[in-house]
Structure formats: structure tokens, C-alpha cells
Image (cartoon, helix red, strand yellow):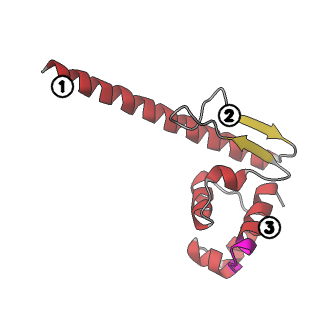
């Protein structure tokens, strides 16, 4: 079982939820949820976000594990992440978890690029409004 799957199981137990309740909240069968907890099912970013919402934690807190990977959020830059400053410290990381972290980082990079485009668009609109 991977570190993330272990953490998810611990959070479920701490939250007082049964496996069936988690399966119901995620609209999946009990057996499917059990495979998630036991590390037999790969989790994509969207599913991790759903699980994080159930536990009322952010996705970074969900994937930060005692025995696995630590992702430190950079604050103070208005975005929360910086390509140069996100730190990943590997104590133990399976290939599946490594691929997951890389997908999460790619997703965050896309979000940043989208925000940058929105900023440019809004700046252009402001400039256009000033000139009229």
C-alpha cells in the first residue's frame, strides 16, 4: 500500500466514516473503495480533489505523508505555487506516486498559465477602458 493510500485510510478512520460511507460519497462501489484504500487503484487528480473535499483538507495536505513525499506550498506570491520553488522531498515514493505527483505539478502549472492569460486579458481590458 502506498503512502497516499495509507493516509487516505487514516483520514477516513479519523473522520469516523465507514468504507461504505466513503464509497457512497464518491459514487462508487464498496469494493472499488476498498481497492483505493489498499493501493490497488490509481487515483487521478480529480478523484484526489474529491477525497480531499470530503476530509475538508486541501490536496497538498492529502498527499503530504509522514513516510512519503512532502510538497511545500509557497505562499506570499499571490498564487500559492511557483515552478521554481515547489519542493518535493522523497523519503519513499513508488513509481505510481511519482507519476501522480508529476501530474499534480503539471495540473498546477496549467492553472498558473491560465491565470497568467487571464491577467494579461484583464490588463488589456483595463488599458482599453482607460483610453476610451
Query: Residue 50: percent from the left, percent from the top?
Result: 57, 62
Tell me the residue that label 1 is attached to.
129
Q: Nearer the viewer, mark 1 or mark 3?
A: 1
Q: Is residue 128 visible?
A: yes
Q: Is residue 98 visible?
A: no
- Name the residue rendered at 83%, 46% in the picture: 93
Query: Residue 17: percent from the left, percent from the top?
Result: 68, 78
Q: Residue furthest left?
A: 132
Q: CA distance from mark 2 to mark 1?
A: 37 Å
The residue segment tinted magenta is 12-19
Q: CA distance from mark 1 to mark 3?
A: 56 Å
Please give the label number shown on residue 86: 2
- Name the residue rendered at 70%, 80% in the picture: 18
Against 107, is 52 above or below? below
Q: CA distance from mark 2 to mark 3?
A: 28 Å
SS for callout 2: loop
Examine the image and state in which quarter residue 14 appears.
Answer: bottom right
State which tag comes first along the sequence, 1 or 3: 3
Task: Please tell me how crowded label 2 is: few (under 14), some (14-19), or many (20+) other residues with Cα within 10 Å.
Answer: some
| 129 sits left or right of 101 in the view | left
Please give the label number shown on residue 38: 3
Q: Is residue 15 magenta?
A: yes
State which tag comes first along the sequence, 2 or 1: 2
**Quick one: quadrant of the C terminus?**
top left
Amino acid at each position: 500500500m502506498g503512502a497516499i493510500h495509507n493516509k487516505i485510510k487514516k483520514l477516513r478512520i479519523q473522520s469516523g466514516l465507514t468504507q461504505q460511507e466513503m464509497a457512497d460519497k464518491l459514487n462508487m462501489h464498496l469494493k472499488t473503495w476498498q481497492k483505493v484504500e489498499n493501493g490497488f487503484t490509481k487515483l487521478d487528480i480529480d478523484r484526489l480533489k474529491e477525497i480531499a473535499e470530503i476530509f475538508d483538507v486541501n490536496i497538498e495536505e492529502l498527499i503530504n505523508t509522514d513516510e512519503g513525499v512532502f510538497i511545500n506550498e509557497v505562499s506570499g506570491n499571490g498564487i500559492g505555487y511557483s515552478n521554481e520553488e515547489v519542493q518535493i522531498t522523497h523519503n519513499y515514493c513508488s513509481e505510481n506516486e511519482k507519476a501522480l505527483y508529476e501530474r499534480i505539478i503539471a495540473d498546477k502549472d496549467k492553472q498558473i498559465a491560465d491565470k497568467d492569460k487571464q491577467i494579461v486579458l484583464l490588463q488589456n481590458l483595463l488599458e482599453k477602458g482607460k483610453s476610451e
